Image: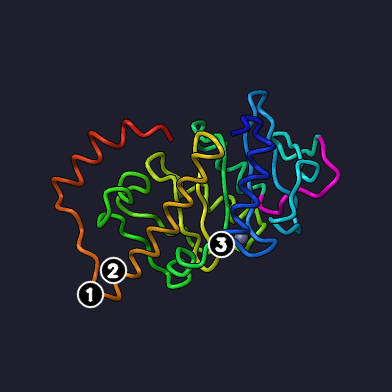
Amino acid sequence: MTTDPRAQMVEICHLLASRTFTTATGGNVSVKMPDGTFWVTPSHLHKARVTQDDLVQMAANGTVLAGHRRPSSEMAMHLAVYAALPQAGAVLHAHPPIATGFAQAGKTIDARSSNEGLAILGPEVPLIPYARPGTDELAETVRAHLKLRNRAYLMRNHGVLTWGSDLWSAYDVLDTLELFAQSLLTATLVGGAVNLPPEECEWLETVVVPTIAY
Ligand SMILES: [Zn+2]
């Protein structure tokens, strides 16, 4: 497995496309570098077609430093996450259909019916209020709802946002979010999800979660 963040970004873009975790040109990926700059995906390029040459390097103030394409229109939202959470090393935004369905319905996701869901996603995946895509208002709305315990968020009438200490951590959270949403939907169809007992949730929070390196 490569350790070059730009190569990892390309791998993840291709996974987002092949797993239908986002629409063709929708969604965006970014990573923070040790020198404080960021690499981001370009706007209006199918995620299955992204190569390293398409990526754009940016400064924390939004200035483009390298790359021949326009950076993602949602970069202000990504920079807001990095500014609010120094622990964030990578941010993903996507439109996975099951989790996004909850965002379209205006519902949060209760993750307490799965030990993995609770551990990775937290007891509840928050719902961030709607703001127009690509605006500073969206970046500010996202920033106002960020919490260290929550690495996954639903964006009302839009999609989802995840972050992690690195690209694969952020991808793990996205993968867990979409597959958990799918299993929760199945549980709802077959009679309703049954949450773990409160004492088991407490054990997971206090014993298991601190061991997860996200
Ligand atoms: Zn989007």
Q: Write the start and end of the magenta stretch as one range.
A: 66-74
Name the quarter where the C terminus is drawn.
top left
Q: Is residue 116 left or right of residue 49?
A: left
Which structural element holds mark 2? helix
According to the image, label 1 marks what residue? 191
The chosen color scheme is rainbow
Report which residue position mark 3 lands on: 95
Write down the quadrant of residue 58 in the picture. top right
Q: Is residue 172 above or below residue 43?
A: above
Q: Secondary structure at mark 1?
A: loop
Q: Is residue 4 above or below residue 139?
A: above
Ligand 1 is within 8 Å of the C-beta of the residue at disc 1: no
The answer to whether 113 is drawn above or below residue 186 in the figure is above
Return the x and y of residue 53 as percentages of the image width and height.
80, 42
The mark found on residue 187 in the picture is 2
Measure the alpha-carbon separation of dots 3 and 1. 27 Å
User: How far is the residue under mark 1 from the one under mark 2?
Assistant: 6 Å
Tell whether label 1 touches label 3 (CB within 8 Å): no
Q: Does label 3 point to a residue whose CB lies under 8 Å from ligand 1?
A: yes
The picture places residue 8, in percent across and down from the top left corner, at 63, 39
Which class describes the residues within 10 Å of circle 1: few (<14), some (14-19), or many (20+)?
Answer: few
